[in-house]
Amino acid sequence: MAAPSSENSENTAVRLASPRGKWILLTTVLGSSMAMLDSTVVNVALPWIGRDLNADLAALQWTLNAYMVTLAGLILLGGALGDRFGRRRIFVLGVVWFAAASLLCGIAPSAGVLIVARALQGIGGALLTPGSLALIQASFHPDDRGRAVGLWSGFGGIGAAVGPFLGGWLVDGPGWRWVFLLNVPLAALCVPVAVRHVPESSDPRAHGRFDVVGAALGALCLALVTYALIEAGQLSTALVTVTAVAGLAAGVAFVYVERRLRDPMMPLEMFSSRQFTAVNLVTLCVYAAFGGFFFLAAVQLQVVSGYSALGAGTALLPVTVLMLLLSARSGELGERIGPRIPLTVGPLVCAAGMLLMLRVGPHASYVTDVLPALLVLGLGMVTLVAPLTATVLASVDTEHAGIASGVNNAAARAASLIAVAALPLLTGMSSEAYRSAHAFGAAFQRAMPLCAGVLVVGAVVAFTTVRRPVPECRHPERHTHCCLTAPPLEGGAEGAASPGK
């Protein structure tokens, strides 16, 4: 999320064609792929995790949300730590931390241990995710930087596309634990390459005043609200109410702290831009729907339609393949016609795809029932993701571009985790519903219209509030994007300030 360090001159910058340049690209792709794979493969493994650990639905929700709480709450802080203490150092720390937490996930003897390990994984993800892009921006010669980011993005997209297939194969083969254990050999390859070949860099302007209080309050707000939503059907009304109020109070305290700090994690003046506020509202709507959909769809295909884990993972491939092939062209179209139409049409097309998923029930045909819905959904996502990112960057001053991208990414992850927490409550899904094809199928039929409705709200917000960016706006560096859980992180422009400066 940060700009290239001013200490990295053109004379010392690495060229992409050099052996060192290829090693840098390899290690950044490996690091970012670890986090990206986890975002796509864990959903496929959920039914198996539940059966093996005798976990109820709430535990499966926390298996996803514990990771997203810490990642969303700390990702901006992770970028600032890299700028201050060294991008390579923090990236390597994140990879090692992520791998250690993955190992704990893989050997977890109970659902409780798995949930704690997933929260630790999110901390590692918050360190390595912004670090991988920052290393590319800080290491490569300016003439090669755009191509390096493009290659990193493209290879990462391929990894995201392979993720569901790989996850299904691992679950059906050696078992769900290997979904997490796979990260250990990847880290064992990534870390030595990074230490040997990646130059260290930092930002001399980074002063070391970190918004730890803001990060903690943000994560606490998400955790408490999520807990209240997940446990609403199990705990007393008074306890749920107290937890929810405490979560909202933490959110209010977060805003208060961010307003008063000299160097906040999330500068609130960015929201003085009407368009920045509007596009983040659109982000909240669309990624809430996506988070809920991908949480339920992989389970629906296995529990209700009778697919294997490999079959369910492979079934979801068309969405990521379409994004891999067409996201760059969608970005070019958004530059020509402006963001209002793509950000209005895209959510509506996605809503149509989710309504088509109502055809997916017992013994659903892949060709006639599943594939058409996923193709429509994928085309909708292609239409909106690249213009959404470009609009975020265009809506703020150049010096805030990196932070704006981070805020948008965190907002998407927060929306996703709230959806995962709320949908079972809203659809009347019992704690054991995923064990029953009838019960889960009935809840899925109620959930898809809810997700589609949230997308329609996002389309209305976009149509009524989003306007064309100014002609001199920055365009995304990442032209290919396949992550289904959040918009891409983008770096700041030359001279941009990172969080915490």
Image: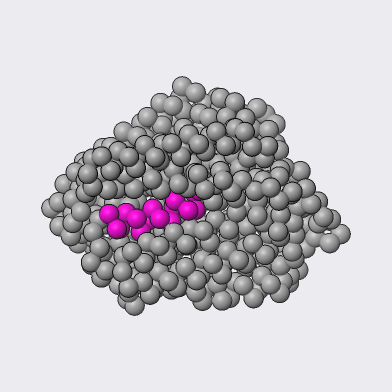
- The residue that appears at 18% across and 50% down in the rendered structure is 430
Q: Which residues are magenta?
A: 58-73
In the picture, which quadrant includes the C terminus?
top right
Question: In this rendering, is residue 391 above or below 83?
Answer: above
- The residue that appears at 57% across and 66% down in the rendered structure is 95
Mark yes or no: residue 15 visible: no
Nearer-the-camera pick, 220 or 206: 220
Residue most extreme to the left? 438
- The residue that appears at 44% across and 30% down in the rendered structure is 344
> Mainly helix, strand or loop, the magenta region?
helix
Nearer-the-camera pick, 347 or 231: 231
Is 187 on the left or on the right of 113, as rendered? right
Mark yes or no: residue 5 visible: yes
- The residue that appears at 79% across and 52% down in the rendered structure is 204
Is 45 on the left or on the right of 148, as rendered? left
Residue 63 in the magenta stretch? The answer is yes
Question: In this rendering, is residue 408 above or below 468?
Answer: below
